[in-house]
Amino acid sequence: MGSLGSHFQSSPRGPEEAVERQCAGNRHSCECRKRKRSSHCECDSEPEDEDSQLDTPRRKKLKSTSKYIYQTLFLNGENSDIQIRALGQEWNLHKIYLCQSGYFSSMFSGSWKESNMMVIELEIPDQNIDTEALQVVFGSLYRDDVLIKPSRVVNILAAACMLQLDGLIQQCGETMKENVNVKTVCSYYNSATMYGLDSVMKKCLEWLLNNLMTHQNVDLMKELGAEMMEQLIQSSDLFVMQVEMDVYTAMKKWMFLQLNPSWDGPIKQLLLDADAWLCERRSEAGEEEPFLNTDDGMPFVPVFRHIRLQYIINDLASARMLERDNILPPEWLSTVYKQQWFAMLRTEHDNDNGPQEANKDEFELNSMRCGRKLTKDGDDKARLRLASFDNSGKVVCSRSTGYQLVTLEKDQEYVVMNLDSRLLSFPLCVCCNFLYTSPSSERRGDTPEPENSARSVS
């Protein structure tokens, strides 16, 4: 984004001087008229309170001048000294303004053939750039404020990156972060990856981790590719509503949509149709080959690998569903059963030979993710039953001293998280991660105390 003052300073006899002569009226004597004043500008001696300056005649005059410059020099092309052609359209512009762009600054200052050309043909290598985006980007060089619509931000970002306009790139990033939602998250993430906006990528990933399971959406599942889904499913920060079996169910629906992108129906019908499709496929194939071992299923192997099966197979109904679907290779389940058996033996050994501490990596990769939704304030009976391990293990929400997440082990309570009820809004989603480890020496012989973490999203 350009700086108005640099135009006035750099070329006292340029196109903006003609505008100055037409804009009659009193003006501050300082020659610095940049939108962001430099540290040596004499204007810095004025009061720094912006609110006190908002309605000053000088500010009104500068705003009026900026609008006039945009209309006269950019839209009307008066006193143009260069023409830019791209995508079948022409812009009559001014070198002094174009030099705010790193792209044009290098072009005009070097020994390029374009340095002295009056007409420049721009090659546009990026399909995200269209004439509307170029109009906005070129116009940003002539005005203080640029309005970026969320629906157009990707196109404007592409053009700003090509022309190396750092200020406009930053503004596009802020616009994207403020407008991440179910309709924009995938396109914003892909664009942020392409144009190197790490903060936007982080924001989109955070949104997906918090909302993928709690607010499932057909269009979103169609957009999510295997690489992104793998990244989400393996994360311990994935907000799992209910239990790990729900992650498997969501992956089954996602896989069905990836293979049947023309499917169009309500989210409530999706699982039924996915199950019917799997059943029909098994009947037609006439064989017991697990789906992930087939050619169609191979691309989904990396994603399903990250489902934490150890927290599914301990529930009989869930284990039977895995067997019925016949999606996963049987050796996957056999491996998990063996791992749990050896883990149990190791735990018995550790009870006799001292404690075993879990490290951070083990917690990230193997902790159990489970959650619950509190629909209204005062819903203090909500419970998360940890049936996979111990029927006495639960998480409850208590209002005895504000909201607390408490684990119950036999008759002993352990506080996991304290929540200030004054800062909460409902419905409130609470997700906890648990990893069972060997008991410490002081608790040897008692029920093992799980390491845990908890998060909430309101």
Image (cartoon, helix red, strand yellow):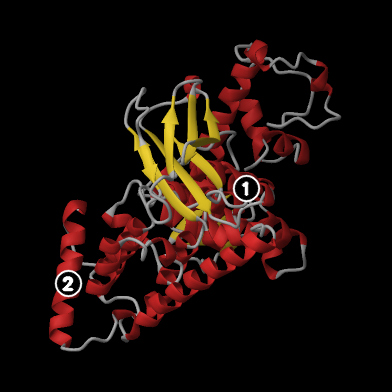
Residues 305 and 87: in front is 305
How busy is the neighbourhood of tag 1: few (under 14 within 10 Å), some, or many (20 plus)? few
Q: Is residue 373 above or below residue 224?
A: above
Q: Residue at x 32, y 59 (%)?
A: 250
CA separation in Å, label 1 and label 2: 50 Å
Q: Answer left or right for 135 relative to 66.
A: left
Residue position marked by numbered label 1 in the rendering:
443
Residues 438 and 385: in front is 438
- Quarter of the rendering containing residue 371: top left
Q: Residue at x 77, y 41 (%)?
A: 10
Q: What amino acid is found at the position of numbered circle 2 in the picture? A: Trp
| Residue 140 percent location from the top left of the image | 56, 42
Instruction: Name the element at disc 1.
Output: helix
**Residue depth check, mark 1 versus mark 2: number of the one nearer the observer:** 1
| Residue 119 percent location from the top left of the image | 58, 61
| Residue 146 percent location from the top left of the image | 53, 38
Residue position marked by numbered label 2 in the rendering:
277
Q: Answer left or right for 200 relative to 181.
A: right
Total numbered labels: 2
The image quadrant where one finds the N terminus is top right
Q: Residue at x 35, y 38 (%)?
A: 373
